[in-house]
């Protein structure tokens, strides 16, 4: 990071803050100056066992990432739960948004066993920080917010709303991009389990690259 292409001063925020949180801050600042065409799911950042920021995508032209910090100290589990589980709108093939009831081939709606959110954190294992992703259906998210948050606060991390696969896609998949000034590689990982198979756990249906870490 200190090469000819990107030189950062010692002690900069990228060196002293969790990179994932700082990434959202940079997106927020960038979208204030120019249109931001890539929407992000609603994201709540937890630090010191409490939420410190809520990031949302504002689709109103020109499109921007908004950081809600006002009143974040008073944010309740009820408000977070409602924001994560409300019915989502998915993009159609034509680029317009369709309500879940009109998405062909898959019934999403408000089934309580659908995947609604996931929590990303890093946990020390044998002296190394390994990423950890926990997926929630409605019941799991309710238990995380209303019980575990009070009795055993979560490690620093982000709670992000899960976005269902697009129209015509029945399996969850993730695209991973590795970029350097000299090369760019892209790979896609697709879960082999049907995303709407509610007999399986949320993680079994939704995990992609993160399953490699657990294995």
Image (cartoon, rainbow, N blue to C red):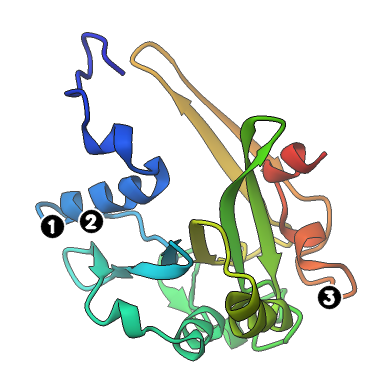
Query: Which residue lies under the disc numbered 2?
Result: 28
Mark 3 is surrounded, within 10 Å at the Cα level, by few (under 14), some (14 to 19) or many (20 or more) other residues, namely: some
In the drawing, what numbered circle is on residue 32?
1
**Label 1 to label 2, Cα distance in Å?**
7 Å
The location of residue 133, given as percent across then percent down, is: 65, 53
- Percent coordinates x, y for residue 162 in the rendering: 57, 66
The residue lying at 58 percent from left, 76 percent from top is 149
Instruction: Find numbered disc 2 in the image and state the secondary structure of the residue it sits on.
Output: helix
Q: Looking at the image, which is closer to me, 9 or 7? A: 9
Residue at position x 82%, y 58% in the image: 204
The one nearer the camera, 176 or 106, is: 176
Residue 42 visible in the current orientation: no
| Labels 3 and 1: the sequence-earlier one | 1
Q: Residue at x 21, y 9 (%)?
A: 4
**Is 181 located above or below residue 29 in the figure?**
above
Task: Find residue 177 and report its horizontal and vertical position in percent.
Answer: 50, 32
Residue 181 location, quadrant: top left
Residue holding disc 3: 198
* Res. 47 visible in picture: yes
What residue is rendered at 26% in x and 82% in y? 71
Secondary-structure class at tag 3: loop
């Amino acid at each position: 990071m200190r090469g000819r292409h990107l030189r950062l001063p010692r002690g900069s925020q990228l060196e002293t803050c969790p990179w994932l949180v700082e990434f959202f801050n940079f997106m927020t600042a960038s979208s204030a100056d120019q249109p931001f065409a890539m929407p992000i799911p609603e994201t709540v950042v937890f630090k010191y066992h409490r939420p410190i920021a809520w990031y949302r995508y504002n689709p109103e032209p020109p499109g921007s990432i908004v950081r809600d910090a006002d009143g974040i100290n008073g944010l309740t589990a009820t408000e977070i739960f409602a924001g994560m589980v409300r019915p989502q709108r998915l993009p159609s093939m034509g680029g317009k948004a369709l309500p879940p009831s009109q998405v062909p081939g898959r019934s999403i709606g408000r089934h309580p066993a659908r995947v609604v959110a996931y929590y990303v954190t890093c946990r020390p294992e044998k002296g190394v920080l390994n990423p950890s992703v926990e997926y929630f259906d409605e019941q799991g998210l309710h238990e995380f917010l209303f019980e575990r948050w009070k009795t055993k606060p979560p490690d620093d991390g982000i709670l992000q709303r899960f976005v269902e696969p697009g129209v015509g896609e029945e399996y969850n998949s993730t695209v991973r991009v590795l970029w350097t000034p000299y090369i760019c590689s892209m790979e896609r990982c697709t879960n082999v389990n049907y995303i709407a198979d509610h007999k399986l756990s949320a993680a079994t249906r939704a995990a992609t690259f993160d399953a490699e870490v657990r294995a």
